[in-house]
Amino acid sequence: MIWGSQRRINGVPIMVTPGIHPPLHKDETRLTPIRPAGLPPRLILPLNQYDMTSTASQVTIGQKVLKWEYLATPNTKIGLPLCSPTSGTVIDIVEHAIAHPSGHSTPCIVLECDGEDSAIDPTPLTDSQQDDPQRVIEHIRQAGIVGMGGAGFPTPLKMLPRRELDYFIINGAECEPYITADEALMRERAQQIMAGIAIVARILRPQKIIVGIEDNKPQAISAMHAANDINVEIVILPTQYPAGSERQIIYSLTKREVVSGKLPIDCGVLCHSVATLAAIHRAVQLGEPLTERIVTIAGGTVAQAGNYDVHYGTPVDYVLTVAQCDRKRITRLISGGAMMGFTLHNDRVPILKTTNCIIAADKAEMPAPPPPQPCIRCGICAEVCPVHLSPQQLFWYAQSQNDEELERHSLFDCIECGACAYVCPSKIPLVQYYRAAKAGIKRKKNNARKAEQSRRRFEFHQQRIQLLTEQRDKERQERRRSRMKEISSTDQDLLTQAIQRTQTKKTSAERNAQDEVCD
Amino acid sequence: MLPRTSSPFLESQHNTGWIMRQVVLAAIPGTAMTIYWAGWGVFANIIIASLTALTLEAIVFLLRRRSVLFYLSDYSALVTALLLGVALPGSAPWWIAVSGSAFAIIIAKHLYGGLGYNPFNPAMAGYVFLLISFPLPMTQWPELGNVDGVTAATPLEFLQQNTTLSMAELWNGEILPFGPHDGFAWINIAFLLGGIYMLARKIFTWHAPVSMLVTLGLASAFFYDNGSATSQGSPLFHWFNGATMLGAFFIITEPVTSATHPLGRLIYGTAIGLAVFIIRAWGTYPEAIAFAVLLMNFAAPLIDRYTQSRVYGH
């Protein structure tokens, strides 16, 4: 069965998965040059950025640090270190809210910037050193590079060659409304991306390298073509959300489907975002760790909307001030895009390595969501689902918490792109239901696993105790038996002696008693 | 503190009320044509059915302690009443429209949980309720185009009762006269136009209506028997008679009670087309849409279960 539908871009056929065409709101930010956001007075640097990469602080309060100096080292083998984005003084290590859907707090290093931005010497790799995969990967690890497209998966982990690489996909689709950070990067710094592609290609030796860019970014496409001195294929994708989602872009560019529950590398494909590749270039060839990124600041309340170079750890309120945001008018503050981002309830959280966009929306732009109406099973959601799920069925089963049917209907293949909720005429927050259902099932499974573990532990404990008692009983019996034997072997002698002893005792006692009577 | 909501933060312009309003809009030509041919009695039926439906819907929401205005604004009760009213004979007494509408709204819709939870198409459930309970007023259609209220057999009834005349004799030499006197054909053409409008506005997909009409056409072509006395009528006859187009575009496309996947909708439409032909040809009731739809409403969940799309990566 052919999956997806065929489109033609400039006469070239391309297969695309289903999707939607929401208003993109990109014109406000896409054509402005990248501007530096500058240094805020303080940076807030979370020690636990992501689940996998918690770090242990290496600095003490009051310590002066230089730019790019290590502030924290990873607790796990796969973790990444934390480098200082600028020079200054560590003034606190304290729990602070971070940009996370849950709004939770985590230990953060608070760095007071001294404004000098004086750095330690950069440590680039020489040309010959770039031939050694282990060395390059280790360098990327030391630079703290994570996937900058969204999930923040540690990049070094993706680079370990697990099998022959057929395709190396470079994701420049950037299909989410509002975000133009990758587009700005491609337009202004295409050489950095191409250099990054060359570094990765040199150590992983893919059969084919393809860059995918949506056709609504003509300037970025021509800039990438102009910088293309390594002859990679640049494919133009039809503008459609979510064309840039990892599994969807892989399908469009390679016609391969990543098997459910597996990683792209399992089907011979590696996918990196353009921003990650630029970061790899800067780490390997310039020796600069990843401490800043391009962030799109957009939304109706922002007067100077555009793309900014922002230091990692910069508080959101500082960036909003730089972009001349009227903060009183904000009705919703969003980290990430309008389709998959999450709301921030507080604007003092720091920008992370994965924060590609901040939307400070006003009331006209994002009014309060209307109350949902009943699902009429119109099926429009199923038509736009890029994974070919049946959102209306999932919704039905999510409401009734029918976990079995939810899994049968592939709930866990949902990429939470929000296309279904966008088109829903009844305005049902479908993705919210799926997230809750996924969390519920995971929790139940976790609980079941824990219960199973403790049951096994208990049974093992019982068994062990039983074994011990049996052994002890056995030993005791043996001891008794051997003692009996000893007794029997040491003859009657002891017995007769004992009898004699008691008899003498008796007679002497009798004599004493007689004496007393006589007295 | 800023509000915290869940993504996505954008939504499309269309809502359920918009879809239902489009359905009402698309039904206007067919309704007008029905009123033109069958008289103002049909108009009265539609008005009575609508007033009953809206009043009862409001009462139900009051009893369920829901916001009446918010739920009435989805227009679903109005669509139900319109589809029921247009299907009733113009000569039927007023209480036919009232009781049919009441059955549709209270029993077929709200007792099952309201919009989205009803397993049967409410308008068709109301229609069948009336047809079984009050067969006499429900089967007496005034002759189309005759405003004097003289009742006459419909072409479908003619055909069902006919055992001696060939098709040519039956229709005076014309298989289906699209002439100025063929009211059913004009009514069906008007509903077809409304259906094409809704297809163009993507209110529903082509699968169910097209598969139903194709199946009905194929079945009638197979049993056409060259227009002899045993013929069951030509494809054109079946397409443009009775409630075929109303059923194909306004009834079986009702999303709540039909299959949801393209393949499922094909199966659903095919089965309805086949059932319509079987009931029309060999059943006791001359018109079959309502029975065929209710029959397949039963099957829709099963069809859905076995027509899931292959999910990416599976």
Image: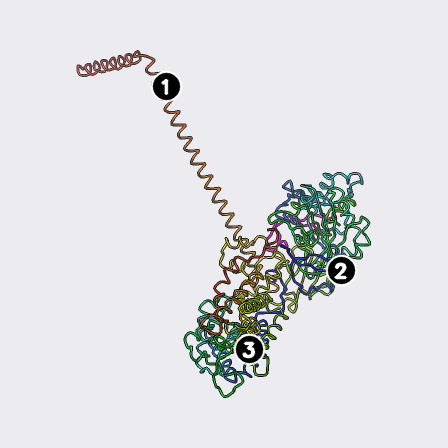
Instruction: Describe the element under mark 3 as helix, strand or loop.
Output: helix
Q: Which residue is mark 2?
A: A11
Q: Earlier in the sequence, mark 2 or mark 1?
A: 2
Is residue A479 placed above or below A145 in the rendered structure? above
Residue type at mark 2 is Gly
Element marked by disc 2: loop
The x and y percentages for residue A274 are 73, 52
**Figure check: A143 above or below B297:** above
> Would you call the spot at circle 1 few (<14 residues within 10 Å), some (14-19), or many (20 or more)?
few
Which quarter of the image is occupied by the N terminus of chain A?
Answer: bottom right
Residue found 34% across the figure and 13% down from its top? A489
Label of residue A482 in the image: 1
Say which element carries label 1. helix
Query: What subunit carries mark 2?
Result: A
| Amino acid tagged 3 | Ala
Q: Which residues are magenta?
A: A85-112
- Which chain does the residue under circle 3 lie in? B
Instruction: Name the amino acid type tagged 1.
Output: Ser
Q: Is residue A93 magenta?
A: yes
Measured in 3D between alpha carbons, the distance from the residue under mark 3 to the one under mark 1, in whole angstroms, is 118 Å
